[in-house]
Image: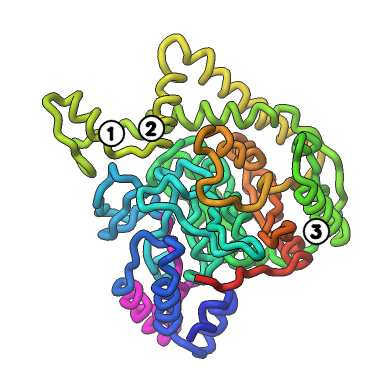
Amino acid sequence: MTDLTSMTIAEAKAGLASKSFTSLELTDAHLAAIEAARSLNAFVLETPDQARAMARAIDAKIAKGEGGPLAGIPLGIKDLFATKDVRTTACSKILGNFVPPYESTVTSQLWRDGAVMLGKLNNDEFAMGSSNETSCFGPVVNPWRREGSNTTLVPGGSSGGSASAVAALLCMGATATDTGGSIRQPAAFTATVGVKPTYGRCSRWGIVAFASSLDQAGPIARTTRDAAILMRSMAGHDPKDTTSVDRAVPDYEAAIGKSVKGMKIGIPKEYRLDGMPAEIEKLWAEGAAWLKAAGAELVEVSLPHTKYALPAYYIVAPAEASSNLARYDGVRYGLRVPGRSIGELYENTRAEGFGDEVRRRVMIGTYVLSAGYYDAYYLRAQKVRTLIKKDFEDCFAKGVSAILTPATPSAAFGVGEKGGADPVEMYLNDIFTVTVNMAGLPGIAVPAGKDAQGLPLGLQLIGRPFDEETLFSLGEVVEQAAGRFTPQRWW
């Protein structure tokens, strides 16, 4: 049965259609894999009974020829997505054992199309983190290890559970969210494919909010094709989300294998950072050469406001977080720590319920929004954001189809290695990804090589608004040239 877990979604769909195996068999194989891999701490809640019930129901539909585009495919769901009657905590103590009476739009669309839920995946608390070490359920472990070393590595964050579970073959794909790189950075750290769609492409309704103008749901999968298959089900207009865009959802899978001949690929000079590791520079050059060999044209482009993106992001995102997290007051749901007054109840609940990183960001956000500092910080950051967006618009206006950059400044690092004394050290992991969120653009991270210690490295492609199809076509070129990598099983 273990062979069933090593298939891609595309292969599993073909196998289910030809009746080579059932969804129940596929689901059981993944449930067994999850059970054997609890040391990775990727899942915070396993739902085997529900998974088997869903699989049986799908098998009955497949038998009648009624299966949807994801019929029988077992998925993991990031614990930021509300799942009806299934605990959803955002991996924070403050939500306690919250069980939503409703389903997020993205997950409801996956179930509509026949997918099976294996359980809820670990993430950084409220999606605030770049290593999946801030979760109240403890850190997620990356299934990859440095050659000749047993050091426990992080899978990246905030969607670390999603990336780790997909890389370790515990689920065929996973939902994730990206506010400043939380899909693309973990994908790069685990040799998986991660897509951050255009802002507004996937509904945010029913997803626990971090920074509302930046958050976007997307898939993490094993291949570019699998990501395209998942994305088609996840995307779409939702009247319940005012930021959701009313545009037809294309068949993303049809873009896989399309010619990239004649496409202009921008190489931004501002992404060549001082002290950037030589292996990242080499990988970037290799990726550019692969695209050129496939017929694309390489052009140097300038994104002059890139250097301001990270500081501006760490003003905008905490400001929105402090506003969004004001609802966790211990009164209506979640954790409640009593106090002698309503003020004390709020203070006690938040002090005990929020972790260090969440408290830090709420404090920063409250500060930059306060009277006397709003103009100096928040307003200025929003102006910078407009300039960052214009940089990209200027590039695309010159006929550039997509922009190629590294996905991360390094390979995965060890648990506890970064950010202890200096939080900014951790924030620097998002240096190549935050511009995409600030501009609301789509981005994809594709595995492209390994570092000297045998750890995976990824490349990022940034596209024009609502042109994810071009990213899938280009991503497939990189994937085919680089080959696929899987971690050696040690867990």
Question: Per the image, is 73 magenta?
Answer: yes
Classify 70 as above or below 100: below
Instruction: Look at discs 3 and 2 and give the one toward the viewer.
Output: 2
Label 3, label 2: how far apart the Cα atoms are:
46 Å
Residue wearing tag 3:
260
Q: Is residue 116 left or right of residue 424?
A: left
Q: In the image, which residues are magenta? A: 51-78
> In the rendered structure, are the residues bearing label 2 and label 1 in contact, judged by CB atoms less than 8 Å apart?
yes
Residue at 61% across, 41% down = 429
Check disc 3 and give the amino acid type.
Answer: Val
Residue wearing tag 1:
350
The colouring scheme, among rainbow, by chain, secondary structure or one colour, is: rainbow
User: In the image shown, does 456 or 256 lie closer to the viewer?
Assistant: 456
Residue wearing tag 2:
359
Q: Is residue 42 left or right of residue 445?
A: left
Q: Position of residue 177 (x, y in %)?
A: 49, 49
Label 1, label 3: how far apart the Cα atoms are:
51 Å
Check disc 1 and give the amino acid type.
Answer: Arg
